[in-house]
Amino acid sequence: MATWNSRGLRGSTLEELINHTNELYRQKGLGLVQKIPTPITPVKIDKEKGNISLAYFEKDSTVDYIGTVQGIPICFDAKECAVDTFNMRNIHEHQIEFMRDFEAQKGISFLIIMFTARNEFYYMRFSELSAYIQRMNEGHPKNFKYNELDREYFIKQEQGALVHYLKGLQKDLSER
């Protein structure tokens, strides 16, 4: 069974930025998107500090965020990458399956990837992710590189939104 160690909070910086953005979107009436907590069962708890130091995952989670933007159902996962090569093993099969099923129900699925060394954010459409998965299944490397990405889907900080992903969503919708 998978376990969680408190030192392994990968993605927490990106999630804080997205949470701030989602709150701004809510306040402006642009959308309602919420973080989906990962279900865990604590094993070790430091009672003095009130911290969980060891836990196990109860089940596979789906994606990090789910909600609606002006009536459009969306779901997405937040991923951080410290280098210019993104390892596809960072995306789990159950997440891909959930996103595929969400798209089949006329929802919009995507990833937000933060390239931490560059402090850049990328909106990856599910169709683009699917193409990388197909390429991987055909025997190509299990990764994609920063320089392969569509420059038009990089996310800018705008209008107080730290990760203003609505522009990527709008472009994604217009290309469907």
Image (cartoon, helix red, strand yellow):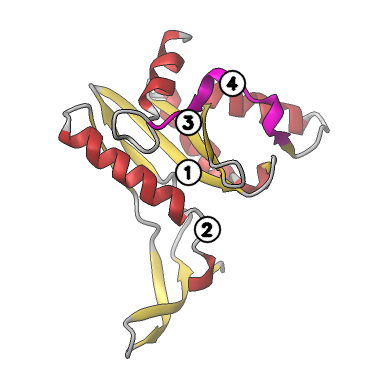
Q: Which residue is mark 4?
A: 151
The answer to whether one can see residue 5 in this image is no
At horizontal 53% and vertical 45% (from top left) the residue drawn is 79
Q: Which residue is mark 3?
A: 110
Check residue 15 for magenta coloring.
no
- Which kind of residue does numbered mark 1 sit on? Ala
Residue 135, x across and y down, in percent = 75, 27
Query: In screen coordinates, is 159 left or right of 98?
Result: left
Query: Where's the N terminus, which quadrant?
Result: bottom right
- Which kind of residue does numbered mark 2 sit on? Arg
Check residue 150 for magenta coloring.
yes
Sequence-earlier tag: 2 or 4 = 2
Kindly state the secondary structure of the residue where label 2 is placed.
Answer: loop
Sequence-earlier tag: 3 or 2 = 2
Labels 1 and 4 touching (C-beta < 8 A): no
Give me the disc on residue 158.
none
Kindly state the secondary structure of the residue where label 4 is placed.
Answer: helix
4 or 3: mark nearer the eye: 4
Q: Which residue is mark 2?
A: 10
The answer for how far apart the CA atoms under marks 1 and 2 are is: 10 Å
